[in-house]
Amino acid sequence: MSRLFSRVLPIALVALAACGPAAVGNYFVPTAAVVNGKAVPESKIAQQLQKAIEGSPQQFKGPAGAANRSDAQRQILNQLLRQEVINQEAAKSGFRVTPKEIHEQIMQLKSGNFKSEAEFNAALKKEGFTLAELREFLRDRELSRKVAARVTKGSEPTDEDLRAFYEENKAQFDQVAKAAHVLICASFDPAAPNCTPTPDDEKIAADVSKRAKAGEDFAALAKQYSVHAATKEKGGDLGFFQRGQMPPEFEQAAFALNPGEVSVPVKTQFGLHVIKLLAKGKTFEEAKEEIQQNLGEQFLQQAFQKWLEDALRRSRVKVNPKFGRFDQTTLTIVQREIEIESQQAGQRDQLPVGGGGRTEGGAP
């Protein structure tokens, strides 16, 4: 479970470039940028880049190493600028995250992924994170969630949006089926991948199929005869599934039926199935909840991204010139022209590109 932290914590894929102790214009080395008068310290870049050095050292060696480090610093600082804008919005809105909330999230992380406190601490150490860094990440994530919930309110898709999506993707919704089944195999073991039916199983399956085709309540038959615990109490209902989700023999038989029809016993690795097709294809009403979830997330993400870009565009952003300059068009930190020329000259002379040299003074 030690790799968990590389999934939940923002680790940049780049390394720390060399920097000198001298003042740079009206910036000093500890400050990477200033957003609306609030400093973003270089230490935050260093925390993430140092982990990348340990995780991918080869990326920063050789002729491309210096350029990769420079790109990396800008990528990380771009994310830090955005988080700072979000945090400032959270402060203006009166949002806060209490120590109790952070503690509860950490406990949830532990209980869901680690067997002991020692295992959790070992994983944290292996990934190079301190408990304080984890708390900071969780705090920022929760503040982002609260801000996103406020600024995207009212951005949910309308019924017209949902229906338009359904019509545009109707072929996809037509390629699904909904079925119920009775699984018969006396020696069925949920933990085993196979179950071989006996002659008695075959007789029972044939009888169940015959009775279901004659109109007997299929759900009642499933509750009485099925060995599939996950569905028998639901009348054997498997819900909707796409092609490729079920065993080939089951899928072929199910999609060959018309809604309401019952199959002959179908043998798969799990035993004998008697299948009843409940529906073929999803109506808009049947697909609405699924579309609402997927399209809703997309709409909210787009709305939050737009808000973030607008907020960043309105912000006063000053970047330490050694990291580049903030471009108002792309809302990202880009290389200064002098740095590009220096790198090109270094490549021509086959010399490594260093972190020192002449710097520009003042705000970009």
Image (cartoon, rainbow, N blue to C red):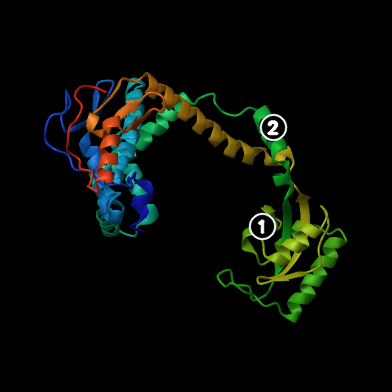
Tell me the residue that label 2 is attached to. Answer: 164
Residue 310 visible somewhere in the drawing: yes
Location of residue 253 (image quadrant): bottom right
Name which residue lies at 76% across and 59% down: 254
Q: Which mark is residue 5?
A: none
Q: Position of residue 261 (x, y in %)?
A: 83, 57
Label whose residue precedes the other's in the sequence (2 or 1): 2
Q: Secondary structure at mark 1?
A: loop
Q: Is residue 197 above or below residue 229?
A: below
- Toward the front, the furthest residue is 349
Name which residue lies at 35% across and 35% down: 79
Q: Position of residue 142 (x, y in %)?
A: 37, 35
Q: Is residue 116 left or right of residue 295?
A: left
Q: Is residue 310 above or below residue 350?
A: above
Q: Position of residue 68 (x, y in %)?
A: 31, 45
Q: Amino acid at mark 1?
A: Glu
Q: Tell me the crowding category of disc 1: few under 14, some 14 to 19, or many 20 or more residues within 10 angstroms, Cα based.
A: some
Estimate the spatial distance between the alpha carbons at disc 2 and disc 1, rounded to whole Å.
36 Å
Q: Amino acid at mark 2?
A: Ala
- Toward the left, the furthest residue is 22
